[in-house]
Image: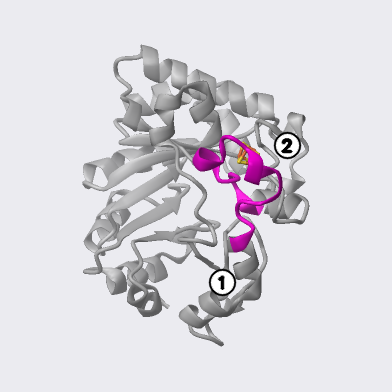
Amino acid sequence: MVDQIADRGTEALSITGGEPLLRKELVLRILERFDGHPAVTTLNTSGWFVNMEMAKKLKEAGLQKVQISLDSYDPKTHDRFRGMKDSHTRAIRAVEYCVKMGLETLVRTTITPYNFDSMPEILNLILTKVSHGLVVKPLIPSGRGLQMDEPLTYEQHKRAIIDLIDMIRMDSRVSQEYVHFLSPCLPFLIDGDFAVNAEKCECGERLAFITSMGDVQPCGYTHHVLGNILEMPLSSIWTESRFLKNWQENRISGKCKSCGFVQTCEGESRAAAYETTPRLDVPDPMCWRREQH
Ligand code: SF4
């Protein structure tokens, strides 16, 4: 699988889960096999299994970046959300170990109904732990996210983004580059300057997701399977899937086509649109303009 990914001239490889370090040896083998390839390698982890020794092994295996999940500045809230006591302590320690080991270390926070009003506190906490940045994204209503009692509302998402932008503007410790928004439209609308920190959704275009069973999907947030790499080469799955063709052709369609913000937004998360409708020619359910549709 790693060789097939490398052969396609891949620019970035992210190892994610669930919790990928439940299979530590496999993660290290993947990284070692990929080492020497020019692509950037990232590990997304809860940090539970990252002690100093593990951080060193990851670095030696060729890992460049790590993203550690943090759901709250408050240990009790984080632990309750994760379902494991001490998760918060271990996540914070993991940040410190990875920074010490010279890995580019980012904290990753999913904006949820439980933390939308405490973004400044989260940012404040990670600044004191010298993490190299914060990545924020809204909760995508897919998988277990669909089972949450309260979905994230548009207003909550907006409040989180406004609070972060206010803090970036007012706190001299936070540079604009420090916070990465994984939802392009809201930062752009609140202040156009922040569009440079916002990443467009590239799922199904420049990004493929491969599950632990070898299933290839356009995105980790949708469960539509394009094919399996144990049965077909990755390149054939990518070029021959009619579903993927449809996904790519409909990325900007329906109401997004005539939207003045389409260049910045490109319909935001296609997986969120597909998982909640299921259609491809509709805007992201978090679209700021949805009330006008
Ligand atoms: S209509 Fe589409 S392109 Fe416009 S803001 Fe909403 S999701 Fe983005």
Is residue 86 visible from the viewing direction of this image?
A: no
Q: Which residues are magenta?
A: 249-271
Badge 2 crowding class, 10 Å Cα cut-off, few under 14, some 14 to 19, many 20 or more, is some
Q: Could you say which is closer to the camera, residue 70 or residue 276?
A: 276
Residue 56 percent across, percent down from the top left: 25, 55
Q: Could you say which is closer to the camera, residue 191 or residue 93?
A: 191
Residue highlighted by disc 2: 151
Residue 265 percent across, percent down from the top left: 54, 40
Q: Which quadrant of the structure image shows residue 37?
A: bottom left
Q: Residue at x 64, y 46 (%)?
A: 257
Marks 2 & 1, CB-CB < 8 Å contact: no
Please tell me whether residue 264 belongs to the stretch shown in magenta: yes
Q: Residue at x 69, y 34 (%)?
A: 152
Q: Residue at x 51, y 24 (%)?
A: 119
Judged from the image, the quadrant occupied by ligand 1 is top right
Q: Which mark is residue 71?
A: none
- Left/right placement of residue 35 relative to residue 264 reads left
Amino acid on which disc 2 is placed: Pro
Q: Residue at x 62, y 36 (%)?
A: 80
Count up the numbered dots: 2
Please tell me whether residue 141 belongs to the stretch shown in magenta: no
Relative to 231, does residue 160 appear above or below in the rendering? above
